[in-house]
Image: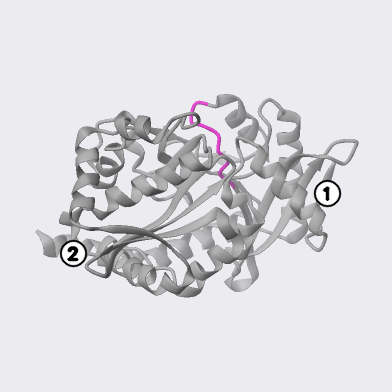
Amino acid sequence: MIAYLNEKDKAACAEYEAFVESCKLGNFMQSLGWAHVKNNWGHTVLLSKDETGAIRGSMLLLSRRLPLGLSMLYAPRGPVWRAGEDGVFRELLEGAKAHAKKTGAFLLRFDPLILAEDQKEIDLLTGEGFAFTPDMPDYTTTQPRTNYILPDLIGKSEEEMLASFKQKCRYNIKVAKKHGVECVICGKEKLDDFVRLSRITAERDGFIARDYSYFERMPDAYGDRIRLYLCYYDGKAISGAITSVYAGVASYIYGASDNEYRNVMPNYLMQWEMIRWALEENCRVYDFMGVPNDCIKGDCQNGVYRFKAQFNGKAEAYAGEFDLVLRPLCNRLFLLMQWAHSLPGKLRHRLRKLKSR
């Protein structure tokens, strides 16, 4: 049975959060907290319930209003259901399709946490009419298709974890400590430092920086499940990160760093402190988040991958995005708008590369 979550009912919301957190496919982006962070989107929560009224599957659907009266629906890292319950999965898909038609959306998009080799679930989605392109180019999907993770954390001590890192990684952590770099867990009073660093990073890497209010909403939404880490050197913030602990996974959501002081290796120390938090919270996985798709082969020369690989984890490829296009002409217009929106950033990034040669 498909139902809608009544968000005015605190007990129902608590039951929803508990369900998402209890599932291996649960993710912080399927928490109601993410809807609070993404407050420029509308949202709806669909529930699959059994005959007793207990939740057996769920889906946070974000709804985005676009110019010309267009709207799209997107379930970030959703839906959520327990392994083996394909009937629940199918029921959620049908519920989402009905909701999309009811609201007049031109597009319904999913990117569930199913692996690239999970052919059964992929076939189920494509059998329901969802378009799927398994070889999408890097950074063209809403969420990364390949993440770098440290798996199997449960039961490991800090000493065992540290010993598992590559020798150069352990050395760089010591370098940061030797230079007096301090990695500090901070409150919102230090968000200005992180926002400054994120703007520097955005300018360097060619993407659009989030504003202060966006980052401010994250601790409000997740409470003690989210932390702001900042590394200070000689009293100045030189790198930072926002990390969450949710559904047994510690996720390195946002990172930022100065263009200077890289020689004191702040990011190695910061990652180690965040991994320590994952161990303290008995997380099963530490998720460094996205790396380029071709890094799944293990011979990637990308700088982000090479940094994350120093911690001796593995690249994990997800199936990717599944789109159900309900109004093809509107979808083509949406793709054109997306391309136009991303073009200035791509051009700036390209110009910086040309100047650096």
Q: Amino acid at mark 1?
A: Ala
Location of residue 191 in the rendering, given as x and y in whole percent from the top left corner: 43, 71
Give residue 159's quadrant in the image. Answer: top left
Decide: few, some or many residues near mark 2? Use Cα within 10 Å; few <14, some 14-19, many ≥20. Answer: few
Indicate whether residue 271 is drawn in magenta: no
The reply to whether callout 2 and callout 1 are in contact (CB within 8 Å) is no
Q: In the drawing, does residue 181 fall left or right of residue 223?
A: left
Quadrant assignment for the N terminus: top right
Chief SS of the magenta region: loop
Question: Please, which residue is most extreme toward the left here?
Answer: 357
Do we see residue 313 in this rendering?
no
Q: In the drawing, does residue 72 fall left or right of residue 298?
A: right
Query: Residue at left 36%, top 29%?
Result: 160
Where is mark 1, residue-wise? 3
**Front one among 294 and 338:** 294
Where is mark 2, residue-wise? 260
Q: Is residue 140 above or below residue 68?
A: above
**Front one among 30 and 138:** 30
Q: Which residues are magenta?
A: 110-117
Location of residue 62 in the rendering, given as x and y in whole percent from the top left corner: 64, 58
Secondary structure of the residue carrying numbered label 1: strand
